[in-house]
Image (cartoon, coloured by chain):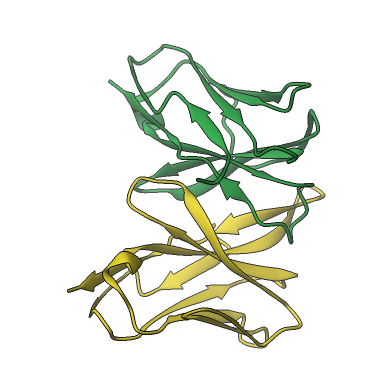
Chain colours: A yellow, B green
Amino acid sequence: SQQGEEDPQALSIQEGENATMNCSYKTSINNLQWYRQNSGRGLVHLILIRSNEREKHSGRLRVTLDTSKKSSSLLITASRAADTASYFCATDALYQGAQKLVFGQGTRLTINP
Amino acid sequence: DSGVTQTPKHLITATGQRVTLRCSPRSGDLSVYWYQQSLDQGLQFLIQYYNGEERAKGNILERFSAQQFPDLHSELNLSSLELGDSALYFCASSVTGGPQQTQYFGPGTRLLVL
């Protein structure tokens, strides 16, 4: 089963609006990462937030982490058409004695011009 | 461009066949990961190598195998292919393979099994 679950599965907004995506996970983590994937292409790393951090910013991106609720959110402000993509959260999980990243199912974001 | 290269970009083959996917990590990265992305299963971790040694195994089928060579490139071998193996296969690399490392993804190989 997936460690991270994104919500919503799909989101469609107008250009210029803010987009918020959420991720919930099941077990304790050391860090959580967000990735973007343009249609049919490889994933691109956006931001990493550590378990002892509550908020992190990178340009128009703002990520929050609430370890008590086992959830994170990704906010994209002033959205642009180029932000149209799928967004995945990834959490580290201990598997067979090694740490690995487990990806959620993703949120498909569409920015309408 | 992430610096990770994958070949081929597209592959069309028949059931029962065997294919090899190739990945070259970013310069300096020692760890390579393989993922399978399909519509119904999402992005699934298959296997990780670090400096030539297997480090972690995920949902990799016994029909699949991988290795990392001394020059750090990696190959994913898929055999006795089934229709359900049709998917995008991604390779990613990171410097040392730790969980706090950013993974850099290649453009993927799109496999279609007919």
Q: Give the residue at the far top of this rendering.
A: B17
Q: Residue at x 45, y 37 (%)?
A: B108
**Quadrant of residue A68 within the rendered picture:** bottom right
Q: Is residue A30 above or below residue B27?
A: below
Q: Is residue B26 above or below residue A89?
A: above
Q: Position of residue B34 (x, y in %)?
A: 59, 38
A9, B61: nearer the viewer? A9
Residue B61 position in % (x across, y down): 56, 30
Give above or below for B65 relative to A38: above
Q: Nearer the viewer, residue B64 or A87?
A: A87
Residue at 48%, 52% in the rendered image = A43
A5 or A106, nearer to the observer: A106
Measured as percent of width and height from the top left, residue A83 is found at 35, 68
Q: In front: B7, or B64? A: B7
Q: Residue at x 60, y 57 (%)?
A: A102
- Residue A87 % position (x, y): 43, 65
Asked where in the image residue A99 lies, by quadrant, the reply is bottom right
- Residue at 67% x, 83% y: name it: A67
Q: The C terminus of chain B is located in which quarter?
A: top left
Occupied quadrant, residue B28: top right
Q: How many marks?
A: 0
